[in-house]
Structures are given as C-alpha cells and as structure tokens.
Image (cartoon, grey):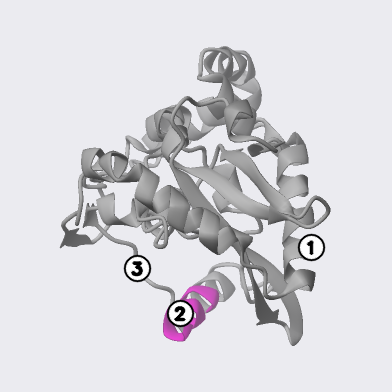
Amino acid sequence: ELAACVARENETVLERLNPWVRQVLKSGGMTKQVACMREVVFLCNAPDLEAMPAFCVGTRMLGRSLPIEGMPIRVRESQASKEEFRAHRDVWNRKVVAQAKRVTDAPSVAKSWDKSLAEAERGVVLGPFRKMFEILVPSPGLCWRKAVWETRNGEQEVRVIDDMFVSSQNLTAGYESTHVPMTADAVGAQVRAADVRFAGDKLAEYPSDFAKAYKQIPDDPSEVENLVLARFEPETKELAYWLPLTLLFGGRFAPLLFTRFFGVCDRCGYTVM
C-alpha cells in the first residue's frame, strides 16, 4: 500500500536522476521503489538515513569512502589519490591491454562474453565498443574484465571479475567503515530466530543468494571514465570495451557498498518483525 501511495513520486524522482543511474534503477524489468524505500528507512529508524540518497546519485568505487552509520568502524587509508591514478593512466592501460589479450582458456572467455552481452541487454553496461574512439568518455582508464571458473553446488560455472587490482583503481580506495562477514554461526542464529518468530510457517530456503546483487546498485556516473572495461572478444579476436553503470565485482569497495544496502533492508526487516 505504501508503494502505491508514493508511486507517482517515485516516477518523479527517477525522472530527475542521471540517465545512467535511472537506467540501472529500471533495469531487468524491476523498477526500484526508491520513494517507498526512503519512507520505510525513516519509519524503521534505520541509522543509515543517507543510504537511499546514495542509491539515487550512484555509489563511488574510487577515492575515500565516508563513514557509514550503523556499520562497524575500520579505517584503511588510500595508497594513491585519484589524481595520481590518472597521472599514470597510460601505464595502467597498457598493462590491462596486455592482460586482456592473453587468452589461456577459450571456453571461459566465450561464456563470460555471453554474460557481458546479457548485462548489456539488462541495461547495466553499455557496449560493446570495438574502438577506443567510440567510447563515450574522452580519456578512459581501463579495467581488465576477466573470466574465472568456480564450483557452485557441485557444478562449474564462469564468474566474471573486473580486476581493479591489476589496473590499480583499488589503490585509490580508502574507507572508515567495513561490513561484517557472514559466518555459519550467524546464519544459524538468524535462521533460528526466524523459525521461532514464525513457528507455524515452513522455512522456504536455508541459504540466501542475492542474484546479480552488485548489478542492481548504480555507480557514480562521474567515475565511469576511470572504469572502462576491456576484454577479449572471441569472435573478432580483438579487444572490446564496455562502460559499467553499476558496482564491479573486483572493486575494493564493492562488498562494503553492497552490504550497506543489505544492512538497511536487514534493519528494517528486523524492526517490522
């Protein structure tokens, strides 16, 4: 009912956002109800009242992150400024190009290419661009998009990683808050609490898998020029380039920024329960 009450306001908010941010918030056929989420955060007295505004302007993956209310304190200083990163951009770009051209596992590259195309179809990346001059930013800083095999539920699948360590964007990341890693004890305690609270209901699932979670959180559009993805295209045997519009799996900030929004949802859910 609350979402229906603020539906018109939600559309107004979305229409006034940066087009790339709006595209992410409407991606996958699931428009984010940011106006409703803002009201829920306020009503539940969640400590991170800045979460929804950050959601609407895009989250930063470069530079220093401000403290996040409600998250544990942990200070880590940046190893380089964004200006220093930009000053050595050509060096990092040559390193990324060399890595991206080195193909050692053709099947994983092909599967990861299909995943990139699926992301473009959902509207969370722009591309592919076959030439550097086609990219929509003037002085791109490259990031290597690579493929790795991992085993999940006994089966092998390809995960796409945007390696911001190789391209040195992670050197600029500094923070004053951190996320709490999930442990088996914590999962057990939460499942037990839900079982007690809803004793008459059957537990639907034990694990929780937030599919494509990072791809639902928009990146700050001003950072895109420093995060242009470079990867090998199987068909042309050349490099192709993509503009990411969301958090990248491979960024130092990504786990912190994802769990920020999950933490707000968790706090609100706990309050309602």
In the displayed structure, would residue 24 be above or below residue 194? above
Q: Specify few, some or many for label 3: CA neighbours under 10 Å numbering under 14, 14-19, or 20 or more.
A: few
Give the percent coordinates (x, y) of residue 26.
66, 30
Q: Earlier in the sequence, mark 3 or mark 1?
A: 1
How far separated are the C-alphas under marks 3 and 2? 15 Å
Quadrant position of residue 259: bottom left
Circle 1 residue: 110
Looking at the rendered structure, the kind of residue marked 1 is Ala
Looking at the rendered structure, the kind of residue marked 3 is Val
* Residue found at the far right of this picture: 235
From where the camera sits, is residue 234 visible? yes
**Part of the protein shown in magenta:** 184-191
Looking at the rendered structure, the kind of residue marked 2 is Ala
Q: Specify few, some or many for label 1: CA neighbours under 10 Å numbering under 14, 14-19, or 20 or more.
A: some
As helix, strand or loop, the secondary structure at mark 3 comes to loop
The residue drawn where x is 62% and y is 13% is 8
How far separated are the C-alphas under marks 3 and 1? 35 Å
Predominant SS of the magenta segment: helix
Give the percent coordinates (x, y) of residue 64.
23, 45
Q: Earlier in the sequence, mark 2 or mark 1?
A: 1
Q: Earlier in the sequence, mark 3 or mark 2?
A: 3
In the displayed structure, would residue 184 be above or below residue 64? below
Q: Mark 3–mark 2 contact, CB under 8 Å?
A: no
| Residue 180 numbered mark, or none | 3
Which of the two discs, 3 and 1, sits closer to the camera?
1
Circle 2 residue: 189
